Image (spheres, grey):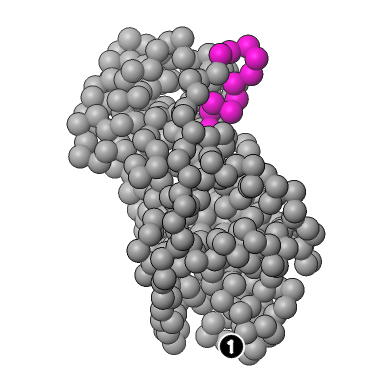
Amino acid sequence: MSRPRTLVLAALSLVAVLAAALGIRWAWLGRRFPAPPAKPPLTRFDKPAPPARVPVPIHVDVPKVPCWSCPDSEKWPIRFQTDLDLLAPLGDGSANAALWLKDFAKPQGARLPEAEKAMQRRIAGPGDFGLVLPPGDPLLKEAEPWADQASLRFYPDVWAVEGGSTPLPNLLVSLSFAKSWAARAASNPDAPAAIEDCRRAIRWGRLLRQDDATIIQDLIGLASIRIGAEQLYVLAARHGDQPLMLAAAIVQGEAAPQRLRTAQLLTRVGIQAAEKDAVTDGKVDDVIGVAKTSPDRRFRNEAIVMLGFARFMGSSAQCRKAERGLAELKASPDTMTAGNARWALELRRADLSRFSNGNI
């Protein structure tokens, strides 16, 4: 089986390669172009995490193994088909954990300096985990009750969607929490809290995937689940718990197909600035189809952003078709879809220079 570090590096590599298409395009701005308008600092969230209870995992004698290579899987949303309650049910905490996590965001998070200091405190984890927070790190401990909450949603509770410039949380800190909990379990596998640390990493990943708004955040959530499930498998094997080993193995096996499908969808809707004839009639039709019908909102959002670029890179007929599609999406009852479509329709040709490096 893949080691945790392999997973993390693979996830981060995909993030880096697809960065321009995943909602962090402003990071590509160099000295050549003016930076986007600065946003005001976010107000610090100063309330403690409310008490929460975490249910006992459900039990199934023989979980079904999803067939991601079967034809029917083409219609599936890119999410776990296995009930993750088998490994780590979500807690019932009443707070939105995003209100706490947003304090570490770049550049306007009220606690960004604390996050940067925490990243400097990281140490080499056991085995191939790479850099993780120390087991007793105060920020890691502070994060624990937030992983027991029932929800983590940034949009629109923290930020509004803004198409290609939609703000993002600090995903390095987010991934560090999951890695550090799993590494702590690996360091002391016989500790009573070891299994709970693995489940906490899985719950954290589940929370990060709730928004279904940006692909990068979803990939980090997926990586967190995979890391927790892998270490949970190791602990289950150590204790001879074969049902738990089977459930953890099935969940691990679902991670790679989801990453692959994500890459495929991004290739399908992506528009390369340097590619000759990047916009065709078929391409516009396909991107409109994804924007309207994808079962995953993050891919609908990405397709909408690409339609905004198609307005300027295609023929006049393709431009009109893209604008008609965006006008329909702007009327969507989903505020995120409508907001992204509005952004795409308000995009100016001069703005394209901001995205001139590689995938627009």
Figure quadrant of the N terminus: bottom right
Location of residue 4 by image quarter: bottom right
Outermost residue toward the front? 46
The residue nearer to you, when weighing 20 against 181, is 181
Q: Secondary structure at mark 1?
A: loop
Look at 49% across and 33% down and name the residue there.
41
What stretch of residues is rendered in magenta? 22-34
Q: Residues within 10 Å of mark 1 (few under 14, many from 20)?
A: few
Please tell me whether residue 116 belongs to the stretch shown in magenta: no
Q: Position of residue 336 (x, y in %)?
A: 31, 38
- Is residue 201 visible in this depiction of the protein? yes
The residue positioned 63% from the left and 66% from the top of the image is 181
Q: How many marks?
A: 1
Residue at numbered disc 1 = 241
**In this rendering, is residue 202 above or below 216?**
below
Side of 317 relative to 47 (left or right): left
